[in-house]
Image (cartoon, helix red, strand yellow):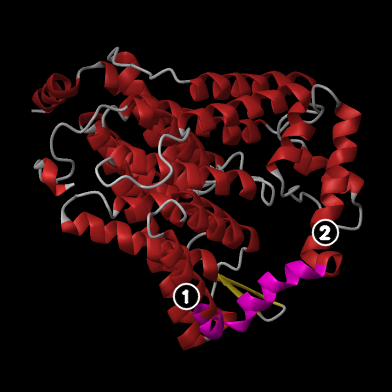
Amino acid sequence: MRFNSYTTIKERIGWQPLFGLGLAAAFIIGWLIWNNWSRAPLLALVLLGGICVLFILRYPQLGLWSCAFLITALPTLMLWQVPTAILFVIVCTLLFRKFFLGDLNWRITAFLVWSSFLFLWWLVTIIWTPTYDYWRFAFNFYPFLIMIVFSDMVRSREDFFRVLIAIALGMLFTAATVAYSMLTAATTGLSNMAGAVIGKEEARFFGLWNNSNAMAYSLMPFIALMVISMRIPYRRVYRVIFGVAALTGFVCIMLSLTRGAILCTMLMLIVFLSTMKSRWYLLSAATVAVVAAIMVVPSSLVNRVSSLGHGMGDASVGERSLLLSAGWEMAEKSFPFGQGIGTSIAFSADHVTHLMANLQLHNSYIDTIVETGLVGTILLCGMIFSLFIAVKRHANSLVLDSDSENVRIAFRAGLIAVLIGMMFEDVIGFPAYWLFFTLLSIHPFLRDRNQSVCGAETNPKSN
């Protein structure tokens, strides 16, 4: 019976993916042993992981959707986080399956070329890095694997919009956890709640995310995409999902009290609304809505945003200014090749001695100059330029019968917000950003929708 069961599995998925299963299981075992887990949870998780990997090998699209869901639902920024390990295993499983089945069919875009050279340069900088944390390289490298997987597996507009649905469900999951943390705060008090930071009369809600900034910046790129997806003729249930995801995602960003993400989201919505034919009515309505919201939102949010006008008088702004000055000093000493990937955090305390050690520079551009020098900066600029080429303007406003052009306009608004947000946070390693960049770069090359997408009617008059 055991032989027959193995034969059935072999006939269904082939023997090559089973090798990928073994490697994935070995990764899980090694990761758990590294973290000193006890034997019982270890065996249970390995068994569960093996079952999930087998299921993903049989249904790879499920693995793709799971990746999109995890990126917006749970924190996947640090390697020691469980969601990150799950995401890493899923991505490796999908790559192993495609590699051993000979099914790799990457879509070579300008963005893929520039980003590949950027990741290669990151690898080269390890050579002269004085004290390098190799786990840090894995953290920087696994978003590259995410980019490869989505570039390979998203082949049609149907695949693209199903990935958007998974992203929307992840945003709804985040909103649910934020709502639960708010309910806990209302019933037990802020001091007993783990999903908020309390200080200076501020309550920053972030649900299961361990950082409010990470949650806000991970949700921000997809808000405009959720809004535009409501206009495309899907089944009503999908349009409702997109609409609720856009609304709750915006609320989560506001509740995080992340000022940079809030300002960039506002800018993104203004750019997006300005492309609509009734733009002045919509902008006027949005202005009224913002004024009304200011009257009902917590005072901590208004005070935190307005404190940006205090300049150096604001403690956070003052600390970041010192870190940026330290970044310029590090960049001058390591010009033109940089001091190595993953080192700006480690050496920030050497330049700003009175601040806490291991602080981020909170600026992706300065961080790139410090760690990768002039070469890395040129590669990053080339990658950004390729993204703008992918969303170059074909229409000045939303087109009623062109779903593709409307999505491109939403991508353009999101890209502007993302690039400005990179001035306020070090987001180069965020999986959400690489997912957004990848979807943006491949969208112009996807096949036209010849029939219904996710159940939409095929009648062209429905557009």
Q: Is residue 78 left or right of residue 61?
A: right
Q: Residue at x 20, y 18 (%)?
A: 14
Q: Residue at x 77, y 32 (%)?
A: 369
**Amino acid type, residue under disc 2 in the picture:** Glu
Q: Is residue 110 above or below residue 44?
A: above
Q: Residues within 10 Å of mark 2 (few under 14, many from 20)?
A: some
Residue 423: give x, y in percent of width and height: 69, 47
Residue 285: give x, y in percent of width and height: 44, 71
Answer with the quarter of the image where residue 348 lies. Answer: top right
Residue to which mark 2 is pinned: 319
Query: As rendered, which of 203 and 84 lies closer to the eye?
Result: 203
> How many callouts does the rendering have?
2
Residue 415: give x, y in percent of width and height: 52, 42
Residue 163: give x, y in percent of width and height: 31, 42
Distance between the Cα atoms at labels 1 and 2? 33 Å
Viewer can see residue 198: yes
Mark 1 or mark 2, which has the lower sequence index? Answer: 1
Highlighted range, magenta: 292-310
Residue to which mark 1 is pinned: 289
- Give SS at disc 2: helix
